[in-house]
């Protein structure tokens, strides 16, 4: 994602793919979708298109990528949530993608009209707009204190090592190089079948600085197992790898509340169970994506 047209609009590109590796070790693509979106500075969709195309996407033009947007997705792509389609997977990421986009501007030292998530150059004593919306922005935490004292709350970041695997060249689909002042979100959800299916997942948000350096902003890894008989989450382990503020990783302590939930219902269960300072919005995004695990298991069947 990056800003365009003198920074008054934002361009989002999404690419999702299901990859099946057989018992012989050979891999093949079983599904693929791309999405292109342009939004205004108010996060409202100006243009949207997908490949393969979908006739309902025009319904989203003019809709703002904030609260209530996911209900609009259900109307535009009926049944997509239940079927766990790749198109729904990408559309569901529009609200968080447009929200975190402000980090691009905060890191580059500019103000972002659509970026309450990463305000820059605040005035000392200013009200903290994100206070208690998540663990990292809790009252008295580093982010809130920085903002209240006039410090831009962009947090720490580390250089992004490559995720490419020399022995598995198609593990990740081809990605263009990040351009300066842009962001990228990568997700991987691997499922191994059997009597107790195992899930291994990775979530990473990176920012390409104006100097062209790619840095990690958020990164989690996750391991889980599924009770095949009931379709419920039997075990869940989350490791916070890179997070901007010390209090961000405290959200991991609360994920056990999801154990026993039907995996296919995690898109709604995560939001209902983890909110405010008990959650990290990026961790929630990672956990909600596990709702696609039953769909991946059908490929293994």
Image: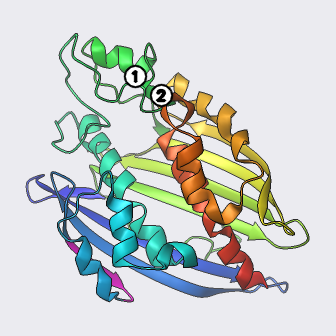
Rendered location of residue 129, percent (x, y): 28, 28
Q: Point out the image quarter for the C terminus.
A: bottom right
Q: Residue at x 23, y 29 (%)?
A: 120
Rendered location of residue 70, percent (x, y): 38, 62
Rendering quarter of residue 194: bottom right
Q: Nearer the viewer, residue 185 or 78?
A: 78
Residue most toward the left?
Answer: 6
Q: Give the dominant element type of the magenta stretch: helix, strand or loop.
A: strand
- The disc placed on residue 136 is 2
Question: Where does the magenta region start and end?
Answer: 47-52
Q: Are marks 2 and 1 in contact (CB under 8 Å)?
A: yes
Badge count: 2
Rendering quarter of residue 95: bottom left
Relative to 229, say whether 300 is above or below: below
Who comes first in sequence, dot 2 or dot 1? 2
> Is disc 1 surrounded by few (<14), some (14 to 19) or many (20+) residues within 10 Å?
many
Q: Distance between the Cα atoms at labels 2 and 1?
A: 7 Å
- The disc placed on residue 143 is 1
Q: Nearer the viewer, residue 198 or 19?
A: 198
């Amino acid at each position: 994602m990056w800003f365009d047209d003198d920074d008054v609009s934002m361009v989002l590109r999404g690419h999702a793919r299901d990859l099946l590796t057989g018992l012989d070790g050979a891999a093949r693509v079983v599904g693929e979708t791309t999405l292109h979106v342009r939004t205004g500075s108010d996060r409202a969709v100006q243009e949207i298109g997908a490949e393969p195309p979908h006739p309902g996407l025009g319904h989203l033009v003019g809709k703002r990528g904030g609260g209530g947007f996911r209900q609009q997705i259900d109307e535009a792509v009926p049944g997509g949530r239940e079927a766990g389609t790749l198109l729904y997977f990408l559309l569901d990421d529009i609200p968080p993608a447009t929200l975190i986009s402000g980090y691009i501007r905060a890191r580059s030292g500019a103000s972002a009209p659509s970026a309450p998530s990463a305000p820059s150059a605040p005035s000392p004593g200013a009200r903290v707009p994100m206070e208690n919306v998540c663990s990292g922005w809790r009252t008295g935490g580093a982010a809130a204190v920085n903002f209240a004292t006039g410090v831009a709350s962009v947090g720490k970041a580390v250089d992004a090592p490559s995720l490419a695997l020399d022995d598995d060249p198609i593990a990740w689909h081809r990605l263009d190089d990040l351009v300066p002042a842009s962001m990228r979100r990568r997700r991987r959800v691997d499922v191994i079948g059997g009597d107790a299916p195992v899930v291994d997942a990775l979530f990473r948000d990176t920012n390409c600085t104006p100097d062209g350096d790619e840095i990690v902003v958020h990164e989690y890894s996750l391991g889980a197992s599924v009770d095949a008989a009931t379709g419920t989450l039997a075990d869940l382990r989350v490791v916070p790898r890179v997070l901007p503020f010390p209090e961000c990783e405290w959200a991991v302590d609360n994920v056990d509340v999801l154990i026993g939930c039907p995996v296919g219902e995690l898109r709604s269960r995560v939001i209902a169970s983890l909110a405010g300072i008990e959650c990290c919005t990026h961790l929630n995004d990672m956990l909600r994506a596990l709702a696609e695990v039953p769909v991946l298991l059908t490929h293994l069947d």
